[in-house]
Amino acid sequence: MLVLDQLTKSYGGRTVLARLSHTFKAGEFVAIMGESGVGKSTLLNLIAGLDTPDSGQVIVDGAPMAALDDDAATLLRRTRMGFIFQAFHVLPHLTLRQNVALPLLLNRRDAGRADEMLAAVGLGGRGADFPRQLSGGELQRVAIARALVHRPALLLADEPTGNLDPETAEGILHLLRQETRESGAGAIMVTHSHAAAAMADQVLLLTRSGLKLA
Ligand SMILES: Nc1ncnc2c1ncn2[C@@H]1O[C@H](COP(=O)(O)OP(=O)(O)OP(=O)(O)O)[C@@H](O)[C@H]1O
């Protein structure tokens, strides 16, 4: 379970999120929509612990993130979370297989599932390629394979199908659904796509006054 408790975040004196509170149930697939600039990516970054709130807290499975030291926060992210961010964060000097296997290696687990996940996102047989040989949409699919490979308890996804054609996007959304269902994982997906939001258990709208059911 993930609790957002009175989260406030400002940039340069401009408040983006003001005392935002919400509880995400474990295992629920939630889509967050809302107009450009309203703070969706900011919210995802706070949940991921990649940015810190000015006040309020993010509580993961009963533990306030701010109370964790760097090592504990890293361990939490590495073992329990999977990320698909807009910049992908694919490492240029590693092959696709090595990129996807990274969460497994960091968790000291067998890397065998990396090839399986590459195949699942339509990149089977390209494990030895390097990121520079890929298109934007292919890179996004590598990031998706990497986010799912270690079966995280919580998947955080920022526009996971933003660079994909509608047909590939639909396939990827099915994969996200199937993988999270199989492992009982929850997901928080920020999207402008109504097609993507339609496959969530719940669609929330972020506005200046907070998160509400769409
Ligand atoms: N690091 C930063 N420094 C300064 N301002 C920032 C920073 N990150 C975000 N902002 C500002 O905060 C506001 C919310 O940005 P955010 O990216 O969270 O919006 P969003 O809802 O995800 O938008 P979009 O749908 O366009 O991706 C924007 O006005 C943005 O300029």
Image: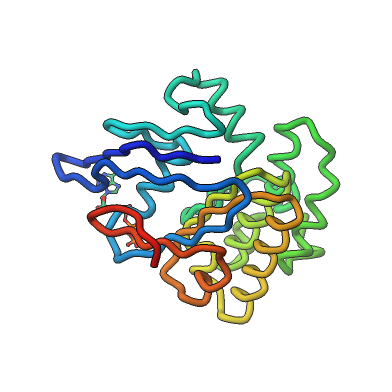
In the displayed structure, would residue 77 be above or below residue 71? below
Q: Nearer the viewer, residue 127 or 113?
A: 113
**Which residue is drawn at the image coordinates 45% and 35% (left, top)?**
49
How is the rendered protein coloured? Answer: rainbow
Left or right of 171 on screen, residue 34: left
Residue 21 x/y as whole percent = 35, 43
In the displayed structure, would residue 106 be above or below residue 45? above
Residue 153 x/y as whole percent = 65, 43
Residue 117 x/y as whole percent = 76, 57
**Which residue is drawn at the image coordinates 29% and 53% (left, top)?**
210
Q: Nearer the viewer, residue 186 or 135?
A: 186
The image quadrant where one finds the C terminus is bottom left
**Which residue is drawn at the image coordinates 38% and 36% (left, top)?**
51
In the displayed structure, would residue 50 be above or below residue 27? above
Q: Nearer the viewer, residue 180 or 127?
A: 180
Residue 148 x/y as whole percent = 68, 51
Left or right of 110 on screen, residue 17: left
